[in-house]
Structures are given as C-alpha cells and as structure tokens.
Image (cartoon, grey):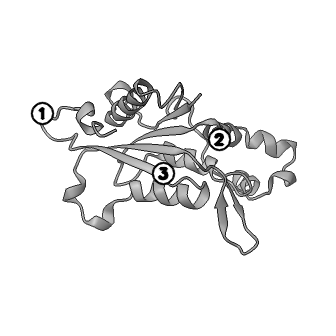
Amino acid sequence: MKKGLHIISSARGDQSYSRGLSTAIANKLIDKNDIDVLVERDLTKSPPPFLDGTLIGEFYKFPEMIDERGKQLLSCANEIFNEMNQADVIIIGTPMYNLGISALLKAWLDQLVRVGVSYKFNADGTRTGCLKNKKVYLAIASGGKLAYWPKECEYIESYIKAVFGAYTGITDISTYRIEGTAEQNFTANYEEIIQSL
C-alpha cells in the first residue's frame, strides 16, 4: 500500500493556486493508483513552531541524549518526521512570497531537518540522508512568471532540492508551476499543467 503526504502551506484556503495545483497532483496520483492512502497536513491549521534557542539546542542533540523535557519540545518535529518517514510520495504546495517559500513551509522544513534523525554524519564527516526512496512533487504558484526574472532569482525549487538532498536523502523531485496568477483575467488550468504526470 503506497502512502501519500500532502503538505499545504498557503493561507489563502480554497482561493490558493498552490493548493489547487498540489491537490490536482494528488488526485491524479490517486487515480493512477500511485497512492492508496493520502494524509493531508495543512500548515495553516496546525502551524509548526518556529525555532528558538531552546528548540535549536534540542535539535543538535543526538537522539540518545534527549531527556523527557526535550521529547516534549520535539513532539511536533517527531510527528513531522514520522509522517515523512511513512510516506512513499510527498506532494508539497507553496505559493511564492517575495521570491521564496512561505514562512509556514520554512518552519515545517526546520522541524524536519535534525541530526541523527533526518540525516547522519559518516566517519569522514560527510552526511547521509535517512529518508531515501521517496518521490516528491513540488507545486509552486506565483503571481509572475519565472521567465521574467533573472535566472539566479529562482529560490524555491533550488532551495527545496538542496535541503532535501543534503539533509534527508530525497533527490527524486518533480516540479510543477502555475504562473502569472496576478495577471488580469487569469484562469487556472491544472490539468494542462500536469498532463505529463
């Protein structure tokens, strides 16, 4: 049985284009029997805590060093990691805010990435991710179009791929974009965007 995890990070609810695109991806994967069970995590309804000094201190402890208080502080991080660990397919929807991902998605990533949990250090000091053999579909919505920006201003797909590759071991990431949503008379056609899926 293949499990899917759908991460929603836009605060616009049903008006969100990133949510619309990521939902279309999830539905198509279900229709193709690539996903049997789908878990939805709406970050706007259950926001991950932002990192502070105390939480960062717990994150940089190896699991065997964490006491009962630390386990309470890491309860959200553990839940997020367990959902990722149990999923075969992850669909992530994010709007573009000021050229980057939403603060909620950044907070989710910060809860996911932990030494000794999502990645481990090898004897030679290199890292190995612990969440391998997973497929990620990234759904990005933006008011403008990537073609209008300088190449070096692509901060979402490259960032997600870098974080997952370095700190989780996930490298199989496919990106779908819905662009120009701020243009006059814009109409969303999700099926056209994901026709190659």
Q: Name the secondary structure under disc 1.
A: loop
Give the camera-side residue of 182 and 152: 152
Assess disc 1: are there few (<14), some (14-19) or many (≥20) residues with their C-alpha within 10 Å of its C-alpha. few
Q: Is residue 125 left or right of residue 31?
A: right
Residue 115 lies, in percent from the top left, at 71, 58
The residue tagged 1 is 185
Amino acid under disc 3: Asp
Q: Which residue is depicted at the point 72% across and 75% down?
A: 124
Assess disc 2: are there few (<14), some (14-19) or many (≥20) residues with their C-alpha within 10 Å of its C-alpha. some
Q: Which residue is depicted at the point 16% across and 41% down?
A: 183
The residue tagged 3 is 172
Asked where in the image residue 164 lies, by quadrant, the reply is bottom right
The span from disc 2 to disc 3 (Cα, nearest Å) is 15 Å
The span from disc 2 to disc 1 (Cα, nearest Å) is 41 Å
Amino acid under disc 1: Asn
The residue tagged 2 is 85
